[in-house]
Image: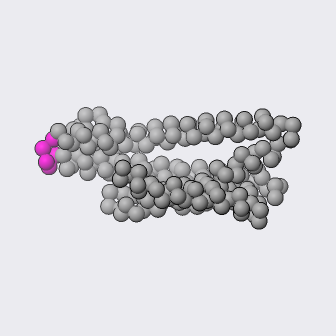
Amino acid sequence: MAAGLWLLPAALGLIVTSMAAPALAGRFAPAHIVAGGLLISIVGHLMLATVGPETGLWVAVVGFSLTYAGGGPLIALGTDLIVGSSPPEKAGSAAAVSETATELGMALGVAVLGALGTFIYRTQLAGSPVGGEAGGADTFAGTVEAAGRLPGTEAGELVAAGTQAFTSSLSTIGLVSAVLSAVMAVAIVLGLRTRS
């Protein structure tokens, strides 16, 4: 419940930018609005890349909020850009491809970045002096559960190692996501430069 409440600012940012994007599209090129949103996301991803065991919670909250807010214009205008770029007789096919690509992209993004994060977490935790005590845990929650079965000092060391491994994986995913968002922003601007 507490984690969900901390994500509310991110959800609010997404709602605000999703609603503002169509209004802005009347004054600015939609491709530039989407690319601008992705630039905001890049700042959020880079903030997430700085999160560490000693970082304040506010850095993660602001980072997630900017990441979500930056995706709003893409969600609101993406399908219109794709359908509007296709010939009228192929608009239905373009909309179907857009929807399929969105679903596939989200699933692949979660799978690939999740696998990368899990790999980094496991590798770093296994390499720590107390990593063997985690019992092969793949998640921070699993590490905390394993720590609950250990004496006080060992439990604290295992949780600290898990925290370090988790924030390292989050930082790496933040950097990878920032690069991918930058590539996507450039591709959108270049690919749709003729659209007003």
Question: What range of the chain is rendered magenta?
Answer: 150-154
Q: Is residue 160 left or right of residue 74?
A: left
Task: Using the image as rendered, state which of residue 92 and residue 43 is in the foreground.
Answer: 92
Q: Can you see residue 122?
A: yes
Q: Is residue 120 left or right of residue 125?
A: right
x and y percentages locating residue 15 in the rendered image:
58, 56
x and y percentages locating residue 41 in the rendered image:
57, 57
Task: Using the image as rendered, state which of residue 179 and residue 108 is in the foreground.
Answer: 108
Q: Is residue 127 above or below residue 194?
A: above
Task: Tally the numbered discs.
Answer: 0
Q: Residue at x 12, y 44 (%)?
A: 151
Instruction: Characterize the magenta stretch by its predominant secondary structure.
Output: helix
Q: Residue at x 49, y 52 (%)?
A: 174
Q: How are the colours assigned in the image?
A: one colour
Based on the picture, tell me whether residue 193 belongs to the magenta stretch: no
Quadrant where the image shows the C terminus: bottom right
Quadrant in which residue 22 is drawn: bottom right
Task: Using the image as rendered, state which of residue 21 and residue 155 is in the foreground.
Answer: 21
Q: Is residue 127 above or below residue 72?
A: above
Q: Residue at x 71, y 46 (%)?
A: 79
Q: Is residue 81 left or right of residue 38?
A: right
Q: Residue at x 52, y 49 (%)?
A: 176
Q: Is residue 106 left or right of residue 186?
A: left
Based on the picture, tell me whether residue 151 belongs to the magenta stretch: yes
Q: Can you see residue 129?
A: no
Q: Is residue 87 above or below residue 58?
A: above
x and y percentages locating residue 106 in the rendered image:
57, 40
x and y percentages locating residue 152 in the rendered image:
13, 48
Task: Using the image as rendered, state which of residue 40 and residue 23 is in the foreground.
Answer: 23
Q: Residue furthest bottom?
A: 27
